[in-house]
Amino acid sequence: MNTPIIDNFNHIISVIKEVFAFYKLPPKPIQTIVVTKNQPIENIIPLLEDGHRLFGENKVQEAYEKWPQLKERYSDIELHLIGPLQSNKVKKALDLFDAIQVIDRESVIDTLTKHSDLIKPHHQFFIQVNIGNEPQKSGVLVSDFPELLTYAKNHAIKISGLMCIPPQDQDPVNYFMMMQSLCRQNGNLKLSAGMSSDYKQAILCGADYIRIGSAIFL
Ligand SMILES: *Cc1c(COP(=O)(O)O)cnc(C)c1O
């Protein structure tokens, strides 16, 4: 079954391969998170039927309207929360999501600790870094990041990666490079960076996870 959605997804995968070949990058797996915010289930099913299992949602509530039924029908789905998380939604998020990419303050870590009985071995946690230090954006400020990482460690929340959304209308490369060095300086954390408009640059800067929405759902 080849729908435009599958074609678009396959196109992204082939572009990733081309980037690796053209720049002679050492091979490594790139995890493509298909971002399904605002997408109805009918648009998600073709991807699941095609075997894709890695998805991202922005809102806990919206995710609950779609993913419990999909997780029942398809095994091994890995769902990442990539939008802002309020402390009062942490418990629900732990129940549905396999990864939370948006930890950006101590209170969220406190709440995770409070519900540590819900944390399963497969759960992954990422710190979101406000890499452009933009006042209106979520993510921990770069200057506050080391302290937050230590705070997570001290509270037995294992951080496996860092996530960022660079400032719009600017060349993202410098921001991606800063994220890459933060990852390397802190024990080779995974990097979640790159969206439809800038995933190629993100891959060149060492992204492990890219998050693609509009380029797939056009
Ligand atoms: C919507 C969204 C994406 C996907 O963006 P596109 O430009 O549609 O590919 C990635 N990351 C986050 C945090 C998002 O909110």
Image (tube, rainbow, N blue to C red):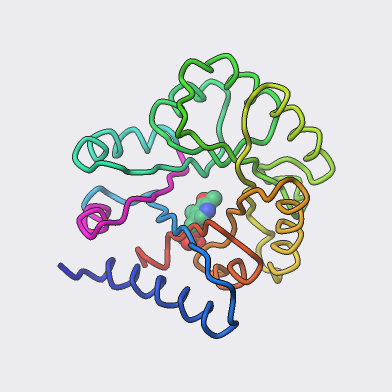
* Vertical relation: 93 (above or below) 42: above
Q: Quadrant of residue 77?
A: top left
* Relative depth, front residue between 150 and 24: 24
* Vertical relation: 88 (above or below) 27: above
- Residue 196 rendering spot, x and y as whole percentages: 49, 66
**What residue is drawn where x is 42% and y is 68%?**
215
Tell me the magenta residue range: 43-59
- Residue 134 rendering spot, x and y as whole percentages: 75, 50
Residue 97 in magenta stretch: no
* Vertical relation: 196 (above or below) 154: below
* Vertical relation: 12 (above or below) 152: below
**Left or right of 213 on screen, residue 175:** right
Q: Residue furthest bottom?
A: 22
- Residue 217 rendering spot, x and y as whole percentages: 35, 63
**Left or right of 75 on screen, residue 152:** right
**What residue is drawn where x is 58% and y is 81%?**
24
**What residue is drawn where x is 80% and y is 39%?**
146
